Amino acid sequence: YTAATENRVKVKLVSPSDKNDYYQYNLTPGEWTTFPLSDGNGEYKVSVLEQNPATGKYAVLASVPLDVKLEDEFAPFIRPNQYVDYIDQTNTIAKAEELIGSETDTLKQVEKVYKYVVENLTYDKQKAQTVPSGYLPVLDTVLSEKKGICFDYAALMVGMLRSQGVPCKRVVGYAGTTYHAWVNVWSEGTGWVTAAIYFDGTTWQRMDPTFASSSNSSDAILKYIG
C-alpha cells in the first residue's frame, strides 16, 4: 500500500469457504508484507482498510477478488507471517532444534515443544488485562521473558514447530465469553489433528489424538474439538 498516512491500516482477507469468516492483519504503508491464505484454494476478497482516529472505525479504501490455487497446500502453515514470525528469531529456532533433536515422529515433536513451553512459561495476567490492540508477539522476547498471554504461548509453539518443518495452524476464537486458542498440527500418519494443543481460558492442555478420536471421549473434550 503506497499512500502516505499516519492512521492505522489493515488488510482484511475474506475466506472463500465462508463469506462471514475473515482474517485481519496490520499493514504498514510503503512496506512489503506477506499474508497467509489460510483457507487454501478458492476466491478470497482482499480489502485495505484505514482507521478514522476520531471514531476508531475503519473505512474500505480498496477491494479486489483473488482467485487462488496454491502451489503448496502447506505453505500457509509452514512459512512465517506477522502472527507467527520466526524469521530472525535465532534463539527460538535454536531451542526448537535442541528440543526436537533427532526425533522424527511429528506428534512426539509436538509433545516435546508443548512440554517445554508450558513448563517454562507462566501466564501473564497483567499483560492479559492491558495488552494493546494490534499486539504481535516477538518470539525471542517471549522465550527470554518466560511469560505471556495465550497468543504468546500459541505463537511460540507454532513458530518453533514451523521452523522445524511441522505444518501447524494457530486458531483463536470464543466459546461463549471465554477466549480460547488452539494449535492444529499435521502429520503424515494422521493428517490434520484438530486441537492437538488447546487453551481452555485458563491453562494450556495437550490433546491426545487417540483419545480425542475415541467414541468414549467426554463432552468436556469434545466441546473444544467439535
Image: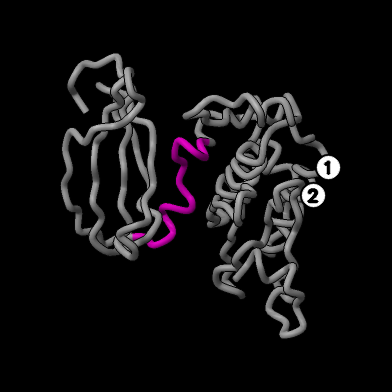
Left or right of 87 in this view: 64: left
Left or right of 123 in this view: 170: left
Count of numbered marks:
2
Q: Dot 1: few (<14), some (14–19), or many (≥20) neighbours within 10 Å? A: few
Q: Residue furthest bottom?
A: 215
Give the Cα distance between marks 1 and 2.
6 Å
Q: Which residues are magenta?
A: 72-85
Q: Secondary structure at mark 2?
A: helix
Residue named by callout 1: 119
Left or right of 90 in this view: 49: left
x%, y% of residue 226? 59, 71
x%, y% of residue 162? 56, 48
Residue positioned 66% across, 28% down in the render: 129
Image-quadrant location for residue 92: top right
Q: Which mark is residue 115?
A: 2
Q: In this orientation, which residue lies closer to the viewer: 74 or 68?
A: 68
Circles 1 and 2 in contact, beta carbons < 8 Å: yes
Give the color scheme: rainbow, by chain, secondary structure or one colour: one colour
Image-quadrant location for residue 225: bottom right
Q: What secondary structure do most residues of the magenta stretch adopt? A: loop
x%, y% of residue 101? 73, 49
For the N terminus, give its image quadrant: top left
Q: Dot 2: few (<14), some (14–19), or many (≥20) neighbours within 10 Å? A: some
Residue positioned 78% across, 44% down in the render: 118
Residue positioned 17% across, 52% down in the render: 65
